[in-house]
Image: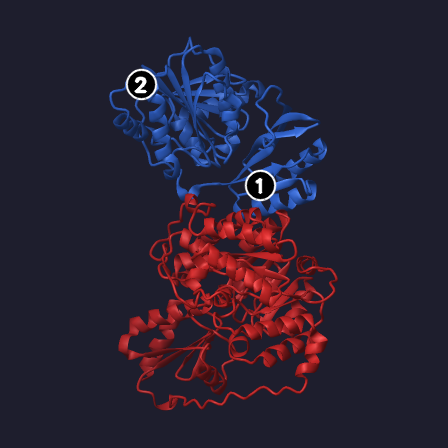
Chain colours: A blue, B red
Amino acid sequence: MTYVFLITGFLGAGKTTFLKDRLSSTKLRTGVLVNDFGKVNFDSMEIKKDSLEIVELSNGSIFCSCLKDYFIDGLVHLIQLGLDEIYIESSGLADPSDMNKVLSVVRLKAVNIQFSFGGTICLVDGLFFPKVLPKMLSVERQVRHSHLIIINKCDLINLEQLEKVKKTLTELNPRAQIIETSYGKFDWQSHKIDVFDIVDEVTTNKVETRNKNLILHILSEPDPEVFRAFLNSISNYFFRIKGFIHMDSQLHKVDLVNLQIQIEPSPGLFDNPGIDQLACLTSQGLDSISQLAKMADKYLPGIFRLEM
Amino acid sequence: MNGKERILKTLKHEKVDRVAWVPFAGINAGSLVDKNATEMLTDGQALFDGLIQVHKLYMPDGMPVIFDLQVEAEILGCEMHWADCAPPSVKTHPLADTQEMLCDCLQPTSEKGRLPMILDVMRKVKSEIGDTTALYGLICGPFTLASHLRGNELFMDLILDENYVNQLMDYTATTAMKMVDLYAEAGMDVIAVVDPLVSQISPDHFTKMCSKAFTTVFDYIRAKGLASSFFVCGNATRQLEVMCETGPDSISIDENVEMKSAKEITDRFNITIGGNIPLTTLMLHGTQQENMKYVVDMLDTLSHDNLIIAPGCDMPYHVPVDNVIGVAQAVRETDTVRKMVEHYEAPKLNIDVKLPDYANLSKPLIEVFTLDSATCAACGYMLDAICVASNHFGDKVDMVEYKFTEKENIARCIKMGVKNLPCVYINGELKWSSIIPSRDELFGVIDSMLAVK
């Protein structure tokens, strides 16, 4: 029997970290369907390993009509491999409100193959959840349409904030089990997910609500301080900027979310000459493109290439 | 200094040895290799051969690879009407009856529509002449593309639904930037954002609903390390300032805008101006000497900094090759040509046109004067708007189009005192000049005329 799990959570909530932790600790035969908002699937780069079956779906949400058919076909493909577990890592902006519908189509397509839905696990960033909830309908939907909610980054918040977050989550989804953790850690042995019925809604992931994303290729190593100043100059315009870049002759992972910039060395990560690029996701439309173009010209003159 | 250096320096507002010359030989290139417009715009070999001939005969400093504002529209689902002597025109508009937005997955990629052919020709032309000639990649401007997608309803939306227009402009600006990516990759030096319909809306509407899209596209082109141009046709005199504010490196205008005063405006913004040799009266119907004299006069009247000599827009298919060679010669050898044409007197247009008896018409007569509704997008949408009214009112009104490509119609325009094209007269009275009326406004005017009758 193959168990299928859906992992949701807003940008930067820790879905990839959570998944990496699970993949490193399990000996089961596992498949992953990774959905990333950008053209380049950075999340899949982080989890890639030889024994893992991966399906990558990039440039949008798997719940949007643009990618839904590919999502269903990709999932059917993984199910047909007869794996023990399959994890679907949805993009941070995914609204999974019609997951039951997706599963019913998958059941029709994956005939004669047994699989069971193991539940939807929603990662919540304990620090930024109160800020993003009022702004992003997809965050509310992710919480409401989940069976297990994991409040991540609890080491960064005080008890008072934790209680507030828990109260809000319970109000939104009284039936879901709520777990507190840091660094995406989760003890799979001691928790059984209760896959209770959740009534589908119409997903808000529509063609009209798609966000813009751009790729910024970095052609040679920038000065780290200048690069950070560049990120600061555009941080207000982008939900999320992530990718890899060489600085000081070393590959670094770059992650900007909720105005927080993280740049840290990533030794051991699969490296190649074209890896130096950042996926930039915005909901602020054309203004953000202008800002990115101007600031890249100012801080990184001659060493970048922008691509829609 | 070679042509490419001359163009790129001009677009960077630097000094050059002489004024640069860019012939807009789109479909006209077909006439040089005995191919019709459809062949030129669909057959890569025909297009390549035509461009090489343009390069050889017209001796350009810079040249467009393809002049067709319908490439993007076709990819996004518009059906085309193809013609022998004109670029295709848009026959159907996918958003004509709906305000839903198109999916991003429809946006242009290198495999869609005619782009595989166009990108291949761009690369070949680049390798053949691209070292010394600046190549222009022409993309459909976001507002004209919005009108291709939405049709004439867009002019109602401008008044009734600003939010929707902004959404649509966001989409079409994204299309423009996707095209910039593709054309940059194929080696284009200059990206020209060609938006004829900008001249047909008010500066206020432009500022509210178009500025951001254009500004973003020009910022994006600059970030790609390319030069940019904003092509407009029609009487864009009122729009010039707001166009400059969007930050292109250059602006190109047609004969509807007076060049000297336009240059005063663009000079204030340190933007290069290009244009504006009249397409039909001069390039199509004039003599070689007339063309040469016109260009010499331009060069004698205008300051030479920030200036490119070019036709007003895409040259008509049948423009005689001698006329374009004459223009090229006048730009390259101005002193010699000045002497050649100093005593030249242009022949007078000797056609007698009889105007209708406007005071005694049995029903309202709508006369649409266009450059050519088949080749000029602004003219096409103006005519479409009038056709909607004509269909609505049926035999209660008469409607006629006069294309400026016919000599008789040129004579009619002179007799009527037509100043700018496209424009609409009703019962001999000018009603709309270079502004496309919304359906409500148009119907209102005709209704009131019928009520008087």
Residue A168 x/y as whole percent? 45, 26
**Residue pushed farthest top?**
A190
Residue A56 x/y as whole percent? 44, 29
Query: Could you say which quadrant of the image residue B1 lies in?
Result: bottom right
Residue A237: which numbered mark, if any? 1
Residue pointed to by mark 2: A116
Residue B244 x/y as whole percent? 62, 61
Looking at the rendered structure, the number of numbered marks drawn on it comes to: 2
Q: Residue at x 42, y 84 (%)?
A: B428
For marks 2 and 1, give the one nearer the viewer: 2
The chain letter for the residue carrying disc 2 is A
The chain letter for the residue carrying disc 1 is A
Label 1 amino acid? Answer: Tyr
Q: Secondary structure at mark 1?
A: helix
Q: Secondary structure at mark 2?
A: strand
Q: Are marks 2 and 1 in contact (CB under 8 Å)?
A: no
